[in-house]
Amino acid sequence: MISSTLKNKIINGDSIKELKKIPDESFDLVFADPPYNLQLRNKLIRPDRSKVNAVNDKWDQFENFETYDKFTNDWLLECKRILKKNGSIWVIGSYHNIFRVGTKIQDLGYWILNDVIWNKNNPMPNFRGTRFTNAHETLIWASKDKNSKYTFNYQSLKCFNDDLQMRSTWNLPICNGNERLKQNGDKVHSTQKPEALLHRIILASTNKNDFILDPFLGSGTTAVVAKKLGRNFCGIEREKLYFEAASKRIKKSKIIEDEYLDTIQNNRSKPRIPFGSLVELGVIKPGTEIYDQKKKINAKIMVDGSIKYQKSEGSIHKIAAKILGAESCNGWTYWHYQSGNTLKPIDELREKLRPKN
């Protein structure tokens, strides 16, 4: 049960103090964009001598690595406590902090699933010419522990990516244009993340009505995208300026109509239905012939749910693999049955047995 005091609310306060007030196992997902501890010591100047608006805010400054490591340990520990048993966490960072954060994630018993590279299409140039242009940030995705049955919407992401598996390198632009929050012509937040990045993360690792926490809410991107995608959110932000800007931004954002929020269900999340069930329930009868897609090969269904092809007998998967000379094959999509004048995959028969939402 989601507490009404947290549901779709943002809190103006210190992250660690506020995290300690939250009940155990409250959230399905945490997205964290913590201070990077950039350690900038000098002003950055462009070739035209204009000043670069870099990250030199007090909230990003720590006395030393030991202080930063303790801070990281404390907020990660609280986030682990308030994650549900099958929840997961995303943490974003740069080379300044992500390796230290990754170590803490493993030390605290999270289970790292992926590191994802956000390759910026339009990065800020390296004005001094002393290093490679810093054109990416790294995200770590981890489940609460190694036994967590975390959400991963594989089929949705594959469809999203033109039926190709989504890889761990994402090419997305930095936040700019109308999306960038400004006040009197200046950026409200120096590290505002693009909505496209959060859209992909939330689509990948949550479902409709899940509860998402951002303990470093900043300009409110996580909450805005969560709201649009029909998820519940909670955010914590210490800085009053950011808190107020995020509040206004969230209020203006609109949820996508409910009928468009459904995503493709992963096959592995559907109830398992063996082929034999179709036989015993009378959906398909023993002796029925099934075919490959071109109807050049046919096999007959036996009473125990096995199939017989020439002198070979076995499961729909084993016989299909043998015919193809492959190690494995999905028999549900290989085999077809006659329906009127057309051939249809036997997988359609299985779908008839699945419970409707």
Image (cartoon, helix red, strand yellow):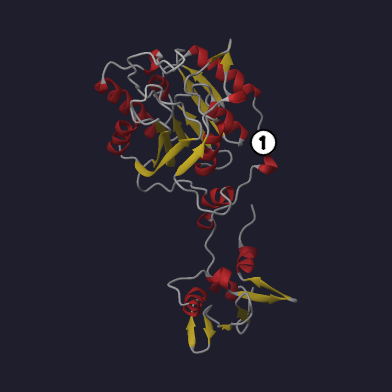
Q: Give the image location of residue 259, x and y in percent.
A: 69, 43
Please name the residue shown 58% across and 32% down the image.
225
Can residue 1 be seen at all in this image of the molecule?
no
What type is the residue that disc 1 sits on?
Ile
Q: Is residue 19 above or below residue 270?
A: above
Please name the residue shown 56% across and 31% down the image.
195
Q: Is residue 347 left or right of residue 48?
A: right
User: Is disc 1 placed on a helix, strand or loop?
Assistant: loop
Q: Give the image location of residue 222, x and y in percent.
A: 53, 29
Q: Is residue 7 left or right of residue 147?
A: right
Q: Nearer the viewer, residue 214 or 154?
A: 154
**Residue position for label 1:** 256
Please name the residue shown 42% across and 39% down the image.
117
Q: Give the image location of residue 166, x and y in percent.
A: 50, 49
Q: Residue at the bottom extreme?
A: 311
Q: Residue at the left extreme?
A: 66
Can residue 117 be seen at all in this image of the molecule?
yes
Q: Residue at the front extreme?
A: 48
Q: Is residue 323 above or below residue 265?
A: below
Q: Give the image location of residue 152, x and y in percent.
A: 49, 47
The image quadrant of residue 215 is top left
The image quadrant of residue 89 is top left
Count of marks placed on residues: 1
Q: Nearer the viewer, residue 116 or 244?
A: 116
